[in-house]
Amino acid sequence: MGAWSAAGAQEKEASRQSSDGGISAIVTAIVSWATSMGGTDAMARLYRQGDTAVLSQFFPGSARPGPPPFVATTFDGRWTLGLIPGATWRAAAAEQGFPSMGAQYTEIHHMFPGMLLTDALRRSGF
């Protein structure tokens, strides 16, 4: 693992966030699937580091929350969108005594399922 650089980490994060990375197709597919279900039991959860304009489509009929970080769910509980940028994860780790945590993409990438899968399951309706 190389030396941690806040500027380097921020530059890499900005590059990742500016790239769509296929999220437009994913959001379109999720919204299409949930709409085609026709019922009230279709649920979708999406958690990301990077924000992009297409995410405004993720809350059909509702305004999405303000700027990240946030984890928000629609009133009916069917849609959850979590936007937690890398800077937020790094700040939380530094506050807990781990100032170099998050310098590598995989460190933050692996924190998402560790923390947010629990949220998704809790909201799942199972």
Image (tube, rainbow, N blue to C red):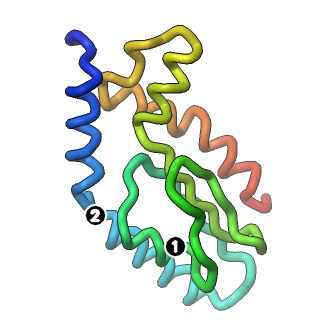
> Closer to the camera, 55 or 77?
55
Pick the quarter of the image with the N terminus.
Answer: top left
| Residue for point 23% across, 27% down | 7
| Residue for point 25% across, 47% down | 16
Pick the quarter of the image with the C terminus.
Answer: bottom right
Residue 83: percent from left, percent from top: 50, 51
Mark 2 → mark 1, Cα distance in angstroms: 15 Å
Seen in the picture, residue 47 relative to 23 is either above or below; the reply is above
Query: Which residue has dot 2 on it?
Result: 22
Q: Quadrant of residue 99?
A: top left
Q: Amino acid at mark 1?
A: Phe
Q: Is residue 56 left or right of residue 114?
A: left
Please tell me whether mark 1 sits on a helix, a strand or a loop: helix
Front of the two marks 2 and 1: 1
Q: Amino acid at mark 2?
A: Gly
| Residue for point 62% across, 52% down | 71
Q: Is residue 86 left or right of residue 84?
A: left
Seen in the picture, residue 113 relative to 9 is either above or below; the reply is below
The tag on residue 58 is: 1
Seen in the picture, residue 67 relative to 33 is either above or below; the reply is above
Q: Earlier in the sequence, mark 2 or mark 1?
A: 2
Q: Residues within 10 Å of mark 2 (few under 14, many from 20)?
A: few
